[in-house]
Structures are given as structure tokens and as C-alpha cells.
Image (cartoon, rainbow, N blue to C red):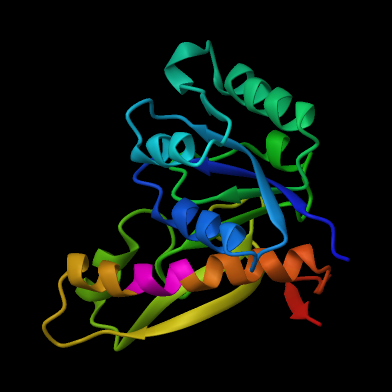
Amino acid sequence: MINELKLAVLVSGRGSNLQAIINKIEAGKLPAKIELVISDQPEAKALQRAKKHGLEDHIVQREAFADQGTFEKKIFELLKEKNIELIVLAGFMRILSPNFIKNYPAKIINIHPSLLPAFPGLNAQKQAVDYGVKYSGCTVHFVNQEVDSGPIISQRVVPVKVNDTPASLSERILKEEHKLLPEIIKIIAEDRIEIKGRKVFIK
């Protein structure tokens, strides 16, 4: 029997990817347990979702701390207390420092709304529409010390329509995010990931 993977989900916004993970766990289709939901935004809708499902949640605002180091120290303490095995960045709008990341090698994943390495950073959907690409999508990758540049685990392709706006493209990409992120967490829980340099293999 596969043990439940202990997750911490870090969020800043509405938490639709958090909800997708919750739904799969509650349906018995994902061998994981969300031990913590951490938000840097007290008004994040994701916190309401966490409370609705009886999950432990914490607000850790950057502004409440003297610097990035003490802010991250608080998050680290929460993670350590729960023996977290995988950190999922699901719309978390803060960049974690190299010092934080080195404590969790290949234990932090992020979902990004483009086919990386294309369009990293903010407003990826707008970047894709403005550039005129024919396909975009989403990427789940391991987090390393550079923004949106860690080893890619998996991607989903979404065609860009002629009349797409950033909002309409975002909506279609999000549907694929909701499928892909829980799928990758399941693969990690089943220990089916192998990393060789920049390449990630799914066994």
C-alpha cells in the first residue's frame, strides 16, 4: 500500500488548483494528505476552501516580517513541524530564495500557465497572446534557484485561438492545470519520478 504523501500547498489567490487537489484526495484518487495550506494573502479565497474542507491553514504575510529571511523561516518552521514531504506552489505569488529552496531539493513543484521555457514570470497568458503563438499550455516543474526554470516534469498543450484574449486563454489553460497538477502529485507519491540533470523521467 502506498503511504499518503504529506503535502503543503502554498497559495496567494482563489485556490482553484488547491481545490483540484482536494477533490482528487477526497475521491480516493490521490494518495496524499494536505497537512498545511499557507497563504501570504489574508484575503485569499484559497483559505476559505481550506477551512471548508477542515484543512489547517496559516497566513504568513511578508509585510509582517523584517526581511525575506525571517518570512521564510516562519514558513520553514511550519513545514518542519508537519514533516512535509512535498511543497506545492499553486498560484503562490512570492519568489522563494535560493537559501529556502536548497532545504528541499526536488521537493518543491510549481505549476506555470505556459509551455516553459516560453513565457516565464508574470502574465504568461498575455505574453503568449501578444507574441502570437499558436499553442500554449501549462507546465509542472521542480523549483530551482531561477524563476520558472527548474526541470520540467510534464506539460499540457492548449491551442491558442485567433480571437483569444489573455482571459479566455487563461480559462482554458486552467482546466488543464486542474488535471495535470494532481496527476503529477500522484506520480510523485508513487515514487515514479527520476531526475537526471535537467531531464525528468516518469517510470
Query: Image quadrant for the N terminus?
Result: bottom right
- Look at the image and say whether residue 139 sits in the magenta stretch: no
| Residue 116 visible in the shown view | no
Q: Horizontal placement of 3 versus 161: left or right?
A: right
Q: Horizontal placement of 197 versus 47: left or right?
A: right
Of the pair 73 and 26, the residue shown nearer to us: 26
Q: Position of residue 17 (x, y in %)?
A: 45, 57
Q: Is residue 130 above or below residue 38?
A: below
| Residue 104 visible in the shown view | yes
- Look at the image and say whether residue 176 sits in the magenta stretch: yes
Query: Image quadrant for the C terminus?
Result: bottom right
Of the pair 163 and 86, the residue shown nearer to us: 86
Give residue 46's quadrant in the image: top left
Q: Position of residue 169 (x, y in %)?
A: 25, 73
Give residue 98's quadrant in the image: top right
Q: Is residue 37 above or below residue 106?
A: above
Q: Position of residue 110 (x, y in %)?
A: 56, 56
Q: Horizontal placement of 44 versus 146: left or right?
A: left
Q: Position of residue 39 (x, y in %)?
A: 48, 33
- Give the residue at x 47% y 22%: 62
Q: Is residue 85 above or below residue 132?
A: above
- Give the residue at x 29% y 89%: 134
Give residue 181's quadrant in the image: bottom right
Q: Which residues are magenta?
A: 173-178
- Give the residue at x 56% y 36%: 55
Marks counted in the figure total: 0
Q: Main secondary structure of the magenta part?
A: helix
Given the current orientation, which residue lies at the most extreme right position?
1
Given the current orientation, which residue lies at the most extreme left position?
163
